Image (spheres, grey):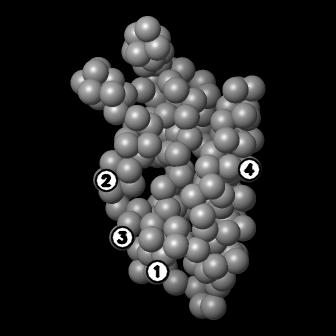
Amino acid sequence: MENVKRIVRHLLMTHWRVRRAFPEDALRAVEQAIVASESSHIGQLCFVVEGALSLSSLFTGISARDRAVEVFSQMRVWDTEHNNGVLIYLLLADRSVEIVADRGIHARVPQQEWDSICRQMEAAFRLAEYQRGVIAGIWAIGEHLERHFPIRERGENELQDKPVIL
């Protein structure tokens, strides 16, 4: 029964509903938060929101975590010089957030820290405060990156700062 509810939620998640949750001004604010965060560390942040999964993915039972790992690879978040890329993935139909961190930062920050940030973001999303939730998550992740990857010299921006909608 839960799987049927999930399928219905995904079928009802339209592109319009994604844009309602993340209008242009919210996407700009998220991008500015990423830029501001990256000014204090050499980590690389990437934010991706996906409205819903395909029917084939739903029928195979793919989890938000599994999909986040796929997106991490597709967006090449793993391909940074210091292995310090971090993906914030939001599956809007499930209101589920996953943080996938590359091995350089994941080795320094325990999984429960990432999970805690995800739960805080999800709490904001339950209140339909998407912009606030994402920006709070960016700042929380940025604190870890600043602690473990402070700026010694400014390198190139390896991942786009602009949020991606799939």
User: Residue 112 at x, y = what percent?
Assistant: 63, 55
Mark earlier in primary sequence (3, 4): 3
The residue to which callout 4 is attached is 136
The residue to which callout 3 is attached is 79
Point 52% across, 73% down: residue: 107
Which numbered tag is attached to residue 47? none
Q: Are marks 2 and 3 in contact (CB under 8 Å)?
A: no
The residue to which callout 2 is attached is 74
Point 60% across, 37% down: residue: 24
Mark 1–mark 3 Cα distance, whole angstroms, equals 9 Å
User: Residue 74 at x, y = what percent?
Assistant: 31, 53
Please, is residue 66 above or below residue 7 in the view?
Answer: below
Q: Are marks 2 and 4 in contact (CB under 8 Å)?
A: no
The N terminus - image quarter: top left
**Amino acid carrying mark 1 in the image:** His
Mark earlier in primary sequence (2, 4): 2
Q: How dense is the environment of label 4, judged by Cα within 10 Å: few (below 14), some, or many (20 and up)? A: some
**Amino acid carrying mark 2 in the image:** Gln
Point 36% across, 70% down: residue: 79
The residue to which callout 1 is attached is 82
Q: Are marks 3 and 4 in contact (CB under 8 Å)?
A: no
Mark 2–mark 4 Cα distance, whole angstroms, equals 25 Å
Please, is residue 9 above or below residue 115 in the view?
Answer: above
User: Residue 18 at x, y = what percent?
Assistant: 53, 27
**Amino acid carrying mark 4 in the image:** Ala
Q: Is residue 160 left or right of residue 113?
A: left
Mark 2–mark 3 Cα distance, whole angstroms, equals 10 Å
Mark earlier in primary sequence (4, 1): 1
User: Residue 75 at x, y = what percent?
Assistant: 36, 55
Q: Is residue 161 visible?
A: no
Say which of 152 and 154 sits in front. 152
